[in-house]
Image: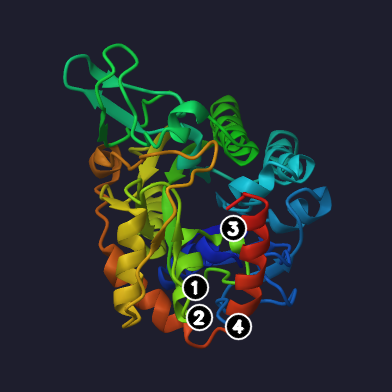
Amino acid sequence: MTKVLVTGGAGFIGSFIVDELVEKGHEVVILDNLDKQVHPTGEKPKWLNSKAEFIKGDVRNKDDVRKAMEGIEVLFHEAAAVGVGQSMYELNYYVDVNTRGTANILEFLANEEHDVKKMMVAASMSEYGEGLYKCEKGGLVEPSLRSEAQMTEGKFEQFCPKCGQELKPMPTPETKKLDCNSVYALTKKDQEELVLMMGKAYGIKTVTLRYFNVFGPRQSLSNPYTGVAAIFMSRIKNNNAPVIYEDGLQTRDFVSVHDIAKANLLAMESNSANYEILNVGSGNPISIKGIAETIAKLYGSDLKPEITNKFRKGDVRHCFADISKIKNKLAFAPSISFEEGMKEIIEWSQNIKAEDKFEQAAEELKKKGLI
């Protein structure tokens, strides 16, 4: 039995990691500040595992970190402020929580007595910006974001900067250059680099897991930054057509929270990925239009998505994971398809009463052009 700390362990992803750890017989401590954007009542969620010790505290608070670290051997750092759009106008908050919060944990590990031997950190596919592409003539291309002029002309795909030919999206490997285009992405890059650097310096085995689009039950439906799938769920359930930017053919990689939790446990249990950066996704691209159509089908709705052909500056066209590295290093294999995962989250959401609040908040953010 190992004593394990999960920061952000009352949150969406962290709570599933907690469940996996408890099931395997580990002694688990949760450090979470129950932020009201994720936990509107400010109270522990009812589904939080009762076998884990809960400490209400903040990763930015030295005393809270010291208390939570007592006897800890393994650390999962999941605590973070999330949301690309919100990060672009709440810069201080995101840098404070994500970058300084991580630095505070690492400063404790650098300067205090502790038993921590291993640490996993949650990173993000948002750090890549655009995904990887291929030109039939010139080979692999790592393009920048599309220009506003191109988008205004309705040319939504990526084109080769040398020959002008339309590029084919490819699975994005960990070796692709990072091209952060939001404060959120930049702070996630800070987190992973700080953890890897300090882990090497102090002999603490560290693993960076770059999550792609995570979905599943326990997502905060009152939080408009939860993601496009939750926004579409809310609209369809309220008999409103999902609103889609561009032509709806842009793709993302959706991975079940159950698979994310399993990947974290594999990283903990194996030494083959120490000091490595690993993508965690499904490896299967799905279009935004396809997401809306799948959700409508699962609700038994005839609603068709509203394709606006409008665009948002800074949006990525295609990004989906190359998961060959995590397969080779940890024998990871995603087990839940997008449709199976959506069935689960829709069933879970039947008892959630936050949709109206979510819908109102989402509409406000759309007016600002942030989602």
Mark 1 and mark 3 lie on one chain; the one further toward the N terminus is: 3
Residue 21 visible at all:
no
Q: Nearer the viewer, mark 1 or mark 3?
A: 1
How much space separates mark 2 and mark 1, taking CA atoms? 5 Å
Residue flagged by tag 1: what amino acid is it?
Arg
Residue flagged by tag 3: what amino acid is it?
Tyr
Question: 10 Å neighbourhood of mark 2: few (<14), some, or many (≥20)?
Answer: few
Q: Which residue is mark 4?
A: 46
Is 351 displayed left or right of 142 in the figure? right
Looking at the image, residue 140 lies above or below residue 254: above
Q: Secondary structure at mark 3?
A: helix
Q: Which mark is residue 326?
A: none
Q: Secondary structure at mark 2?
A: loop
Q: In terms of depth relative to the viewer, which is nearer, 162 or 20?
A: 162
Q: Which residue is mark 2?
A: 238
Quadrant for residue 183, please give it.
Answer: top right
Question: 10 Å neighbourhood of mark 4: few (<14), some, or many (≥20)?
Answer: few
Q: Which residue is mark 1?
A: 235
How much space separates mark 4 and mark 3, taking CA atoms? 22 Å
